[in-house]
Image (tube, grey):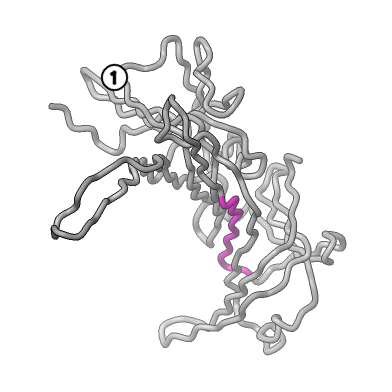
């Protein structure tokens, strides 16, 4: 039996014409070089218990939980191409491809949407993203889809090419915010898997539906004066994360959630500023 090293695993994706649509002829996949790829399948077993025995009476399949997680450096070839789908919630087919010398395994997650995406950056690192996806179904194949092509999105974005701006609540009067050493923000769609009683595929979700969105993040800053510590008293503001090449996320009507400061004998004091936003826009709108 072959063993598949993680270094050979590939994360490929393609837009679906509708949720759960079959692949088109000669599907043109795009490929992301990932740090971590974690596919999972959970049949959500219903465990039936009853009096008279200490053991389970029966096991029945529940509503399938199929999904995957990916962590990757945002590619400079096309920074927003994949991660932007946390905003538009377009349906995707994901291929997790493990290829050996003589055979391969291709896990196809269909009817997928990005449930949550976190974008982060730190000094002396590159721009990174972590995405959680929820899918309608997953199947395994021992061959690639007929005629499939794979376009690699490569490169990375250096921390030195990224900027943060702070401005008025409506996104106006943005000024450089040049005290951050690390930052991250999360867009969470709170997707719900919805099943219905039906004759075909009853244990698989019929709908993968985004619900009310959460927008939040955190900046780690150098602690330069006492006024920073009172940031929680600020009024509403906006934060723009400039990802380079004209790509950005702009969070509006923000409020600081929490301000904390860490002191260690072997490091300088820092300041962590957590925020929640009411709305946002981005460069792809």
Reply above or below: 264 against 24. Answer: below
- Corner quadrant of residue 89: top right
Q: Is residue 189 magenta?
A: yes
x, y percent for residue 6: 29, 38
Residue 151 image position (x, y, % from top left): 51, 23
5 in the magenta segment: no
Q: Which residues are magenta?
A: 180-190
Where residue 229 sits in the image (x, y, percent)?
A: 66, 85
Could you tell me which residue is drawn at 57 percent across and 52 percent down? 190
Which residue occupies the foreground of this view, 84 or 136? 136
Tell me the residue at 62%/74% (across/down): 273
Quadrant of the rendered image containing residue 180: bottom right
Which residue is painted at 34% across and 40% down in the image? Answer: 41
In the structure shown, which secondary structural element does the residue marked by tag 1 occupy? Answer: loop
Q: Residue 172: image x %, image y %?
A: 86, 60
Residue under numbered circle 1: 142
Q: Main secondary structure of the magenta part?
A: strand
| Left or right: 122, with 233 as reference point | left
Q: Is residue 7 above or below residue 174?
A: above
122 vs 141, left or right, is right
Q: Quadrant of the N terminus?
A: top left
Q: Residue at x 53, y 18 (%)?
A: 28
Q: Residues within 10 Å of mark 1 (few under 14, many from 20)?
A: few
């Amino acid at each position: 039996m072959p063993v598949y090293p993680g270094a050979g695993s590939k994360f490929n994706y393609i837009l679906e014409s509708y949720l759960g649509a079959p692949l088109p002829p000669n599907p043109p996949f795009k490929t992301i070089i990932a740090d971590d790829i974690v596919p999972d399948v959970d049949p959500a077993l219903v465990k039936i218990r009853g009096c008279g025995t200490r053991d389970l009476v029966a096991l029945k399949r529940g509503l399938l939980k199929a999904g995957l997680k990916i962590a990757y450096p945002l590619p400079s070839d096309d920074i927003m191409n994949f991660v932007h789908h946390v905003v538009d919630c377009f349906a995707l087919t994901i291929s997790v491809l493990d290829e050996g010398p003589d055979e391969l395994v291709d896990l196809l997650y269909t009817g997928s949407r990005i449930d949550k995406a976190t974008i982060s950056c730190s000094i002396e690192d590159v721009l990174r993203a972590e995405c959680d996806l929820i899918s309608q179904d997953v199947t395994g194949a021992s061959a690639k889809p007929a005629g499939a092509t794979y376009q690699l999105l490569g490169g990375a974005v250096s921390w030195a090419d990224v900027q943060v701006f702070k401005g008025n609540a409506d996104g106006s009067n943005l000024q450089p915010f040049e005290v951050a050493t690390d930052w991250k923000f999360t867009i969470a769609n709170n997707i719900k898997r919805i099943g219905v009683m039906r004759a075909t595929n009853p244990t698989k979700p019929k709908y993968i539906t985004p619900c009310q969105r959460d927008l939040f993040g955190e900046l780690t800053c150098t602690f330069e004066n006492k006024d920073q510590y009172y940031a929680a008293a600020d009024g509403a503001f906006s934060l723009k994360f400039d990802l380079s090449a004209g790509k950005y996320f702009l969070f509006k009507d923000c409020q600081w959630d929490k301000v904390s400061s860490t002191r260690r004998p072997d490091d300088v004091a820092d300041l962590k500023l957590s925020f929640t936003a009411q709305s946002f826009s981005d460069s792809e709108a």
